[in-house]
Amino acid sequence: MIILWKADYEGEKLQEDLTRLNRLQKEIEGKIGGKMDGPYFPQDASVLYIFHVEKYEWLNEAGRIYFSRVAQENLSFIPRSYEIAVTPEEFFGATKGTNSLTSKGV
């Protein structure tokens, strides 16, 4: 599954703070797994990261680390939204020997 995470920036040194945020995101990736893509600059937020993870609980685990570290480092990124996207297999469950899209009539 992937998690699309967006945040707004309310500081004054975006490039410097992006470096610090990226370091924090890599730290989270190292502690609880997953793979990170980003940062990207979407049209509707200041920054976007894409996380490739194996389990939904990753979001809660990452959030606990993120909020404590952002407070410690005084980063000015405010989470705006997140979206979770799953594969058909993750959504419907693995169907042995069949494609889950065709087995569900999609």
Image (tube, rainbow, N blue to C red):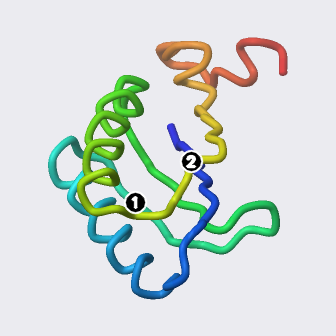
Q: Nearer the viewer, residue 102 or 87?
A: 87
Residue designated by label 1 = 36
Residue kind at label 2, given as amino acid type:
Pro
Q: Circle 2: is it few (<14), some (14-19), or many (20+) Cα within 10 Å?
A: some
In x, y percent, where is residue 44?
80, 61
Q: Nearer the viewer, residue 86 or 73?
A: 73
Of labels 1 and 2, earlier in sequence is 1
Secondary structure category for the residue under label 2: strand
- Residue 79: image tag: 2
To which quarter of the image does residue 102 belong?
top right
In x, y percent, where is residue 10?
60, 66
**Which numbered mark, 1 or 2, is in the foreground of this view?**
2
Q: Residue furthest left?
A: 31
Q: Nearer the viewer, residue 17 or 31?
A: 17
Q: Is residue 97 left or right of residue 59?
A: right
Q: Residue at x 30, y 34 (%)?
A: 64
Name the quarter where the C terminus is drawn: top right
Residue kind at label 1, given as amino acid type:
Met
Q: Residue at x 49, y 85 (%)?
A: 13
- Residue 99: image tag: none
Residue 13 position (above or below residue 8): below
Q: Residue at x 32, y 51 (%)?
A: 71
In x, y percent, where is residue 82?
62, 40
